[in-house]
Image (cartoon, helix red, strand yellow):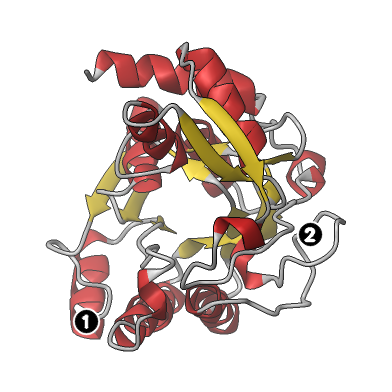
Amino acid sequence: MKVLVTGVKGQLGHDAVNELEKRGHIAVGVDIDEMDITDADAVRRVISAEKPDAVIHCAAWTAVDAAEDAENIPKVRAVNIDGTRNIAGVCAELDIKLMYISTDYVFDGEGTEPWQPDCRDYAPLNVYGETKLGGELAVRDALDKFFIVRIAWVFGLNGGNFIKTMLRLSDKYDEIRVVNDQIGTPTYTYDLARLIVDMIETDKYGYYHATNEGGYISWYDFACEIFRQAGKKTRVIPVTTEEYGISKAKRPFNSRLDKSKFVKMGFAPLPDWRDALGRYLEELKKGE
């Protein structure tokens, strides 16, 4: 199978290409230099030339706080909504199945019940969430052969993430304040890449939620485990979101994603997030 992967320079796109190649598929990784997704002609030209069997669309504007700046909003919309619509339109015309990587941010983050993948109670809290929802709707409206996979709390080797931030701060400070009222589950892109390739090899289309196993935790819990496994003595002080201070973009309190659907559809669960964290820390050491 030939698969085109957008956002290859990002955390998930990088791992998706590696997983595809590991299985003997032909992976075509593109980023803005190879295919600017906001340019409809470029999207049509590249996809038509490559003629993939499937597209895994990882490219997105993911700088959540920067997305709130007035001067950036048109750019965010162009990437997350218009760019996705460009890809979906060509995939529909050429009968190419499409996987769109989305986020828990399409919901309002209220309550304590895990969000179901087929829930339509959309109420994004910020520009990033609004535009990722716009991308979802563009995919849904354009074609039938689609996967929409919502993920949360992602970490991988490429780019920045919470783990790298915590490790960097631990080198500067003896104490770090971390919020304990935002709840979710970490997601290692290496493990997630395995799942999304499992999915793209099938025609089990629809909406899915995917994170690592291991239950729901706070960012405070995550930070404590990061330092424990990394052998750091940094003290983590739990604070509420209000105590921590308001960021530009409002964050969801409830990022619990129910993952039972993909298991019912025959896909294997991801490993426990603690196990994923340990393997990730080992990979970071190799890169030092």
Q: Earlier in the sequence, mark 2 or mark 1?
A: 1
Q: Is residue 82 left or right of residue 199?
A: left
Image quarter in which the C terminus is found: top left
Q: Is residue 214 left or right of residue 156?
A: right
The quarter holding residue 89 reads bottom left
Q: Are marks 2 and 1 in contact (CB under 8 Å)?
A: no
Q: Is residue 221 above or below residue 42?
A: above
Q: Is residue 24 visible?
A: no
Three-letter amino acid code of the residue under disc 1: Asp
Label 2: element kind: loop
In front: 124, or 174? 174
For the point 24% across and 20% down, which residue is it?
287
In front: 49, or 72? 72
Q: Looking at the picture, how far across and down is residue 267, in whole percent?
A: 69, 37
In front: 56, or 82? 82
The quarter holding residue 119 reads bottom right
Residue that carries the numbered disc 1 in the rendered image:
39
Q: Is residue 211 left or right of residue 92?
A: right
Image quarter in which the N terminus is found: top left
Residue that carries the numbered disc 2 in the rendered image:
115
Q: Looking at the picture, how far across and down is residue 228, in whole percent?
A: 56, 16
Specify the farthest residue to the left.
33
Query: Which class describes the residues within 10 Å of circle 1: few (<14), some (14-19), or many (20+)?
Result: some
- Mark toward the viewer: 2 or 1: 2
**Marks 2 and 1, how far apart in space?**
34 Å
Q: Is residue 189 left or right of residue 276?
A: left
Q: Is residue 78 visible?
A: yes
Query: Which class describes the residues within 10 Å of circle 2: few (<14), some (14-19), or many (20+)?
Result: many
Give the number of the disc on residue 231. none
